[in-house]
Image (spheres, rainbow, N blue to C red):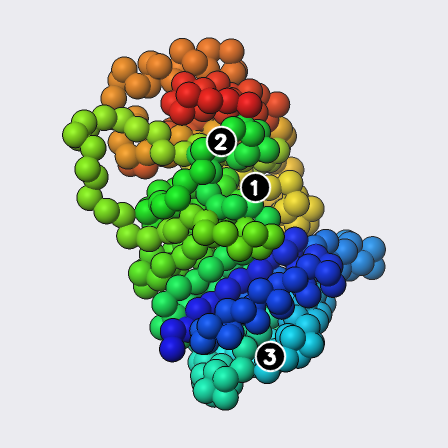
Amino acid sequence: MAIIVKKFGGTSVGSVELIRSIAKKLAKAYHRGDQLVVVVSAMAKTTDNLFGLAYEISKHPSRREMDMLLTAGERISMSLLSLSLFEEGIPSISFTGSQSGIITDDHHGNARILRVNAFRIHEELAKEKVVIVAGFQGVSTSKEITTLGRGGSDTSAVALACYLGASKCEIYTDVAGVYSADPRIVPQAQFIGEIGYLDMLALSYNGSKVLHPRAVEFAYRYKVAVEVKSSFTFEPGTLIKQEESPKDPHMEERKVNAIAHKDNILRYRLAPDTGVLQLLEKWHYEIYKINLYEAALELYIEEKYESELDYMLQESGIPTPEKSRDIGFVNLVGLGLAADPAFMAKVLRLCANSHLQRISHSCRTLELMLPAPQVAKTIALLHQEFFGVNG
């Protein structure tokens, strides 16, 4: 029998009613003979509420204690889902990340998975049970509870699929899959039925919230097929897999495959001296981008990390840096877009009123930096041009 890993995000398990609905759908899959490993996030808003409680007590809470606190959210979800499966007559058992054998390094708050020792999962699958795993968490080599940072449940699910030899990893969320742009900005964005690992990595790194880049990295490295689908309909979604050879007769045509974006980003400009480099060595949260520009090291981070970085700068005795707010990024994803001057001219013409501040590119992206209030309008213009529809 094939092992299938299914992951459900916070909005998917956001209430008892939703958890019961998922249990009924899992029961049908179980009766088809699938071996199921189910990874769950904390119920919607639970992690944010726990963060809020911690920061009511401390302006700079211990990372270790934060991990102890935050991992409670997923334990609630896993237990409720297991109880719901019992009510459906399905044998199940729930495990924390540590009980599942997810072994990490010692970086509290953003730990990296070193290996998975999933013998307990195999034992329970052999007993014909559904195994439910708390996502987002593991245990370090020094026996400390750790969390995996943003998107950690996605990473847990794909990592388990890799190490269990699962035939597929299904990521259930509140959207039907991957689209040509964010449907909240472009309501008529086009659904993408299949996408290659590298394009999905480019989208994830550049702002797409559908799947965390660390999860896509695992899938790409171990060639695990991942499907993103709706937890409300269970209909087929977007399959992320190895790229196929192009069949387009226009072999060198510059084609935009999708548009990703980030807004409300902060920029810190710092002198790249020893103190700043030591700070970076201690920083374990996400940095969206790092640039060295005009003898200044530019760090671009999400607003939620501002207080943490400010605290570390102060503790390190680094002078207050130049800080800029409301920075946005729009990223066109496609192979070799910036290699064609005519294509670049078209983009610049379309964005003439977007107040572009900088353009950079890689082999798969063309990145536009601009004021955050210009992001939505710019995406609509570019989507209209390259996909024929807008909001």
Residue wearing tag 1: 301
Residue 175's place in the image compared with 365, above or below, is below
Which of disc 1 and disc 3 is earlier in sequence?
A: 3
Which of disc 2 and disc 1 is earlier in sequence?
A: 2
- In the displayed structure image, the side of residue 128 where residue 49 appears, left or right: right
Which of disc 3 and disc 2 is earlier in sequence?
A: 3
For badge 1, the amino acid type reads: Ile
Q: Secondary structure at mark 2?
A: loop
Q: CA distance from mark 3 to mark 1?
A: 44 Å
- In the displayed structure image, the side of residue 381 where residue 304 appears, left or right: right
Residue 229 at x, y percent in the picture: 50, 52
Q: Residue 205: which numbered mark, if any? A: none
Disc nearest the viewer among 3 and 1:
3
Nearer the observer, 224 or 24: 24
Residue wearing tag 2: 189
User: For the point 60% across and 57% down, which residue is it?
Assistant: 9
**Residue 278 appears in the picture as rendered:** no
For badge 2, the amino acid type reads: Ala
User: For the point 59% across and 82% down, which residue is it?
Assistant: 91
Give the quadrant of residue 322.
Answer: top right
For badge 3, the amino acid type reads: Ile
Q: Residue 90: which numbered mark, if any? A: 3
Q: CA distance from mark 1 to mark 2?
A: 27 Å
Quadrant location of the N terminus?
Answer: bottom left
